[in-house]
């Protein structure tokens, strides 16, 4: 985890605006040579004309923010509609080619439908389409008859077609059979034979007339077209006719998850692959190892939490006992991600953040800097870490199946910069020896020194400019992923960085071209894209998978837009936020536990008076009670299944319960795959709940052999208990008190997604279950009894 809390200013960098862009000068004393505007582009032009420069200088075209419109050679490909393109040049002195300036220029490129009347306006989606021309009318999904794959592409596209077929059924109820051959009216046609070769690997055309055609050059681009189809259908079952030409500005659109200090179940990772894919986010970095802060664990390394999340046969004690993945499962996760056009970037973080390794092999821990640092002067250290990487990289079928692997390399003690640089270089080359490209955290400004560090085929997450000056890293030749901590770091319930990202500020002001206080020119090819991150610094603070997702969900939508097209925000933030509420996580996913239709209030009531198709009992029966019948349960194998899994924030759940006097510890009342509400939490005899390895109790017991009215409300801030209409306990604003010398207090997260999949599993009766997707007021709750 990156420990520094606030970004600092970088000295010695001059950013001078010229024309329509930015310039990074060599020094404050440099004067800026003049550069004219680019001559206007006319219909039919196939190449840009370079602008005139001051005598003694020449321009090199380095990049474009719309490469499929104007590429790095200056070739022009006609867009659908007039498009503003920013070109990035380097202005180079003829007799001193080491002196150069960054220059941005904008041009308008005429479109194929120049001035043509548009009937259907551009439909809303996330990220927004880069180019759209609307026709007249709509295509109704109910009219679709088949999904057709181009014959030449059947082997490549059968997986994408099968996924789309399943998701269309889940989302709309409409089932389309898959055929191979030529399309007809009413078909959805998938093809990799798009004639426009400028759109690149991730570009695609989405054409809607009498059929829907998704055409691309590569699987990934075509798959993004299927996400466009699904997003349109989530909002409305008819699709406006027209044509879209869509493509990303940035190659890396990422999210990094700290899986080391909080374990995330495999299903959560699999769901996140699909969730990210739905918003065309293509880069999922999984931080597989890390440790807590020693001062929160009595100042003792032996007691400090550390975890490594992968099965390891070379060092079996390395693998965490409280949550890990088998190699088989991790391979399957990466294969699923490939199917959904997402890269999994596995990260093994060394030589700092390395307590899991030193607990497994104590001899490699640093006595000078602490056991979370590897001893870089011990030859055994390299051998152990080589063995770990080798286990996942070697052989014909390696565990890490993708092209890139992240080796960490961050926040090591500054005193040992040369050894750190040598270690970094060694493991770059070691991992590359297995045919992989390398990612690492930016640290080479902090670890300043003379020991060379390999640049070729290395991409750097530049996160804090004091650790890696992004301008200096560019000059060294590193490709960069913009990961600025002051913009993009979520650290749940920690009191520093962000608990929830400032989405409005990000949408309005940030782009991947911005790293700290530095902004690179649009089109700079050394900026590969961006990535935001969740760091679970405060081990044991009660944060749940659901709480993490509650923070990530709104950020994913905004950053999907900003990473697909930095400045192409079609609508203002308020409209974006309003319209984005119509879009969820993708077909089959409901990580947020939302019940009912988007935008509409939800309420459900189960009287349990008689048999109900929605309630499926197992070893439970209906018994006559004061309000008609109630459900009668006789132990852990006696329960009723409800038609819901859970409800997320905000909610109110009301029910009546009459427990017998012979219930064991941990007897459940409600259960889901994520949580259990218990009649007796452990040995406490109190009503409580368990989830994510945490146990909570309300400090109140439920009376035996009498009917009691229970109401539980939940938000992203905490959980409240009402008994017989009166508030008994609010699990809000509690703190963990640490014993470090600062007597640190950190919030304790006591939230609950209320489980609704099963009721029962105890001895006794339950009745009158009501569920709202809002928190009722105290007066409303009192009136319920």
Image: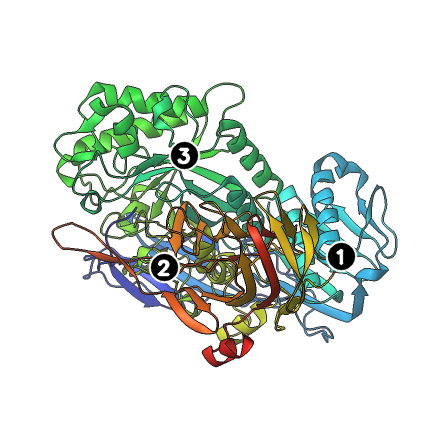
Which colour assignment does the render follow? rainbow
In which image quadrant can residue 11 be found?
bottom left
Mark before the other along the chain sequence, 1 or 3: 3
In the rendered view, does 534 fall on the left or right side of 635? left
Residue that mark 3 sits on? 309
The mark found on residue 699 in the picture is: 2
Q: Is residue 119 above or below residue 469?
A: below
- Tell me how many marks there are: 3
In the rendered view, does 477 fall on the left or right side of 670? left
Q: Residues within 10 Å of mark 3 (few under 14, many from 20)?
A: many
In the rendered view, does 763 fall on the left or right side of 26? right
Q: Residues within 10 Å of mark 2 (few under 14, many from 20)?
A: some
Structural distance between the alpha carbons of marks 2 and 3: 35 Å
Which of the two discs, 1 and 3, sits closer to the camera?
1
Question: 518 or 709, which lies in front?
Answer: 709
User: Is residue 774 at all visible to an observer of this figure?
Assistant: yes
- What kind of element bears circle 3? loop
Q: Position of residue 555 (x, y in %)?
A: 46, 61
Question: 295 or 9, which lies in front?
Answer: 295
The mark found on residue 730 in the picture is: none
Q: Residue at x 48, y 78 (%)?
A: 777
Q: Are marks 1 and 2 in contact (CB under 8 Å)?
A: no
Q: Residue at x 34, y 55 (%)?
A: 491
Q: Are marks 2 and 3 in contact (CB under 8 Å)?
A: no
Q: Is residue 736 above or below residue 578?
A: above
The mark found on residue 613 in the picture is: 1
In which image quadrant can residue 445 be found?
top left
Mark before the other along the chain sequence, 2 or 3: 3
Which of the two discs, 2 and 3, sits closer to the camera?
2
Q: Position of residue 60 (x, y in %)?
A: 42, 51
- What kind of element bears circle 2? loop
- What kind of element bears circle 1? loop
């Amino acid at each position: 985890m990156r420990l520094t809390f606030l970004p600092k200013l970088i000295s010695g960098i001059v950013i001078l605006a010229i024309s329509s862009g930015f310039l990074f000068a060599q020094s404050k004393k440099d004067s800026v040579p003049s550069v004219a505007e680019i001559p206007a582009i006319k219909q039919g032009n196939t190449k840009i004309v370079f602008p005139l420069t001051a005598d003694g200088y020449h321009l090199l075209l380095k990049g474009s923010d719309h490469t499929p419109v104007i590429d790095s050679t200056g070739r022009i490909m006609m867009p659908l509609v007039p498009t503003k393109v920013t070109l990035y040049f380097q202005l180079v002195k003829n007799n001193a080619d080491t002196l150069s300036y960054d220059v941005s220029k904008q041009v308008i490129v005429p479109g194929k439908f120049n001035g043509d009347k548009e009937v259907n306006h551009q439909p809303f989606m996330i990220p927004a389409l880069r180019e759209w021309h609307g026709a007249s009318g709509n295509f109704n999904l109910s009219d679709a008859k088949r999904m057709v794959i181009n014959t030449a592409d059947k082997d490549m596209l059968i997986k994408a077609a099968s996924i789309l077929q399943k998701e269309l059924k889940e989302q709309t109820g409409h089932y389309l059979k898959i055929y191979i051959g030529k399309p007809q009216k009413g078909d959805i046609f998938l093809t990799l034979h798009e004639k426009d070769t400028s759109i690149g690997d991730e570009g695609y055309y989405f054409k809607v007339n009498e059929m829907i055609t998704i055409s691309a050059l590569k699987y990934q681009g075509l798959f993004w077209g299927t996400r466009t189809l699904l997003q349109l259908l989530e909002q409305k079952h008819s699709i406006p006719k027209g044509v879209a030409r869509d493509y990303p500005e940035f190659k890396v659109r990422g999210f990094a998850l700290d899986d080391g200090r909080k374990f995330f179940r495999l299903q959560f990772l699999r769901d996140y692959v699909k969730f990210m894919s739905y918003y065309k986010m293509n880069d999922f970095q999984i931080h597989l190892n890390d440790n807590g802060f020693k001062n929160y664990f009595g100042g003792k390394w032996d007691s400090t939490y550390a975890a490594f999340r992968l099965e390891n046969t070379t060092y079996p004690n390395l693998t965490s006992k409280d949550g890990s993945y088998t190699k088989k499962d991790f391979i399957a996760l990466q294969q699923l991600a490939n199917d959904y056009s997402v890269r999994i970037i596995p990260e093994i973080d060394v030589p700092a953040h390395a307590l899991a390794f030193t607990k497994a092999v104590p001899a490699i821990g640093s006595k000078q800097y602490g056991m979370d640092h590897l001893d870089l002067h011990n030859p055994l250290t390299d051998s152990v870490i080589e063995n770990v990487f080798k286990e996942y990289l070697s052989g014909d079928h390696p565990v890490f199946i993708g092209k890139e692997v992240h080796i960490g390399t961050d926040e090591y003690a500054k005193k040992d910069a040369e050894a750190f640089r040598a270690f970094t270089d060694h493991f770059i080359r070691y991992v590359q020896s297995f045919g992989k490209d390398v990612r690492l955290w930016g640290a080479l400004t902090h670890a300043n020194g003379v020991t060379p560090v390999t640049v070729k085929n290395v991409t750097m997450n530049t996160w804090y400019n004091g650790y890696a000056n992004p301008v200096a890293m560019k000059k060294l030749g590193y490709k960069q992923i913009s990961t600025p901590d002051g913009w993009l770091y979520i650290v749940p319930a920690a009191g520093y960085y962000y608990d929830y990202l400032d989405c409005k500020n990000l949408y309005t002001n940030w782009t991947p071209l911005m790293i700290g206080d530095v902004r690179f020119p649009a089109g700079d090819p050394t900026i590969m894209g961006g990535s935001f991150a969740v760091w679970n610094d405060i081990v044991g603070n009660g944060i749940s998978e659901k709480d993490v997702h509650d923070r990530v969900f709104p950020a994913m939508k905004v950053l999907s837009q900003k990473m697909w097209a930095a400045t192409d925000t079609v609508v203002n933030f308020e409209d974006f936020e309003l319209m984005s509420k119509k879009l969820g996580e993708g077909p089959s996913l409901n990580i947020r536990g939302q019940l009912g239709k988007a935008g509409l209030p939800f309420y459900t009531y189960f009287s349990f008076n008689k048999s109900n198709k929605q309630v499926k009992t197992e070893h439970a029966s209906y018994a006559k009670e004061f309000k008609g019948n109630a459900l009668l349960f006789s132990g852990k194998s006696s329960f009723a299944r409800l038609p819901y899994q859970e409800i997320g924030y905000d909610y109110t759940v009301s029910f009546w319960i009459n427990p017998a006097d012979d219930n064991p510890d941990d007897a459940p009342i409600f259960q889901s795959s994520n949580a259990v509400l218990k009649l007796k939490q452990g040995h406490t005899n109190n009503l409580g709940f368990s989830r994510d390895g945490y146990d909570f109790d309300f400090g109140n017991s439920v009376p035996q052999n009498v009917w009691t009215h229970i109401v539980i409300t939940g938000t992203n801030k905490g959980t409240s208990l009402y008994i017989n209409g009166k508030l008994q306990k609010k699990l809000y604003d509690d703190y963990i008190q640490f014993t470090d010398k600062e007597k640190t207090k950190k919030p304790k997260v006591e939230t609950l997604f209320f489980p609704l999949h099963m009721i029962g599993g105890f001895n006794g009766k339950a009745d009158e279950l009501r569920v709202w997707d809002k928190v009722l007021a105290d007066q409303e709750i009192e009136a319920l009894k």
